[in-house]
Amino acid sequence: MFKFLSDVVTNATVSADWIGIRAVKDIARACAIRDAHPERNTQQFDQGAMVEVLAQGQFGYSATNNLSAASLAAAIVSAYEQAIAASQWAVHRFTTEVRPKATGSYVSPHRKGLGALSPAELNQILLQVCDRLKVSDKIAQTTASARSHDIETWFVSSNGSEIYQRDYLIETHFGTIAQDGPITQLRTDHGYLAQSYQGGWELFPGLDLWQRVQQVGEQALELLRADNCPDLATTLVLAPDQMMLQIHESIGHPLELDRILGDERNYAGGSFIKLEDFGSLAYGSGLMNVTFDPTVPGELASYGFDDVGTPAKREYLIRGGQLERGLGGLESQQRSHVPGVANSRASTWNRPAIDRMANINLEPGDRSFDQMIANVEHGIYMETNRSWSIDDQRHKFQFGCEYAKLIENGQLTRTLKNPNYRSITPQFWHSLSQVGDRSTWEMYGTPFCGKGEPNQLIRVGHGSPVCAFDNIEVFGGAV
């Protein structure tokens, strides 16, 4: 593939400053069960290439699903013409410095291939999940699903880049709705498709699957009998599966440099962060340490290079509460003069790379879960996101969770249903008072981070310990 693509670039007839081709092949499987009835069994094959051309300081793009030399050559011409047409409207003129030569490879860690489970075997596991979720006649609905992707990417450029990457992805979910008269409660396995990772089918079913299934079913019933979350300002303790959403919405998106530069305001919104805040803003308390880390084995958005060939490495975004670095690739870094990361990413072959989150992780602290709870005289512990709302500047937010426990005199006591909390991003992170140690740290993922015009749904990963926040407004009632 490399020689073929390189030959296409070498034989290009346009006088461009730089040409790149990113070819992608994606084999996907999906199975879904609802109430012991198969809903979906599919296998899809998708392939194509994105051509990128730099000319007169501007980039032009053209995609094709025909990987012939003639079709790719035509795409190069089309991308070149777009770049020339855009040059008279340039906001910033780029040089080849934003596309340095890079070579290398990356393959997801895995022990079992994505063909290790037949469709019949996978369906049987999902049917068993639904069956075991039904721990009572009050379980009104059960769902279970699993998806896999085998994605190969080849990237070549006119200045000698050659990068091969292969991602093995597993995305799984199960959950239930319990009902008692007019009362209904949802409980899932840490949120919809939150159990999404890089690897093979060794990740599913996994050693603890049936224990998790039993717990989800029993907690759904437990919520039917629970009191509503009270309305008060108190200490809020968040589990890692809810911290995933908190990190994503109130750290990840606000730090995207293209948002701050204004590129995303028409669709995905902007940010309360200003360019001059980098290097000076106290984003949160001194316990707050956040990294961009696409090097974590098995985390959903790990990779060796971003989609324009920048080598990926771990970087601190926030250290000791101080904002250091933005989520922006080479183009945004050149425009903003703010340090960024290797996060120019595209959702598939027919989308250009833009600034995206990858793995954004909150680093662990030094307290066990028991120590954290023991330090709380009165508070509420919450797990698993079920609703979210945040303004388009990523400033004010309101999030709801599936499951909560009251904390009284340093102990978890009664179960609470319909727990919610609200705050303002800087105020919230400045209230961070305890950070769990490595034993509390868990990572999850989501395949549904949306952004860009045309829209791109992309995979991101988030790892976090349990965290405690002081004097947060919590409230109950149905969301």
Image (cartoon, grey):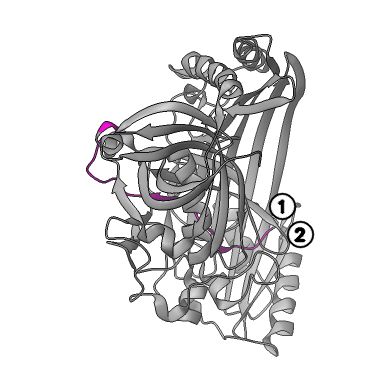
Dot 1 amino acid type: Leu
Residue drawn at (48%, 27%), measured in percent from left and top? 415
Residue 148 image point, x, y percent: 60, 32
- Which is more toward the observer, 442 or 409? 409
Q: Which mark is residue 67?
A: 1
- Height in image: 31 above or below 138? below
- Height in image: 273 above or below 313? below
Residue drawn at (73%, 72%), measured in percent from left and top? 77
Residue 25 image point, x, y percent: 64, 44
> Circle 1 sits in a helix, a strand or a loop, which is it?
loop
> Circle 2 sits in a helix, a strand or a loop, which is it?
helix
Label 2: which residue? Answer: 71
- Which is more toward the observer, 99 or 254? 254
- Height in image: 82 above or below 107? below
Residue 453 image point, x, y percent: 71, 64
Q: Are marks 1 and 2 in contact (CB under 8 Å)?
A: yes
How many numbered tags mark residues here?
A: 2
Q: Residue 473 vs residue 438: left or right?
A: right
Q: Quadrant of residue 420?
A: top right
Q: Work out how far the residue at label 1 is from the one at label 2, CA to CA, in angstroms.
A: 7 Å
Q: Tell me the crowding category of disc 2: few under 14, some 14 to 19, or many 20 or more residues within 10 angstroms, Cα based.
A: some
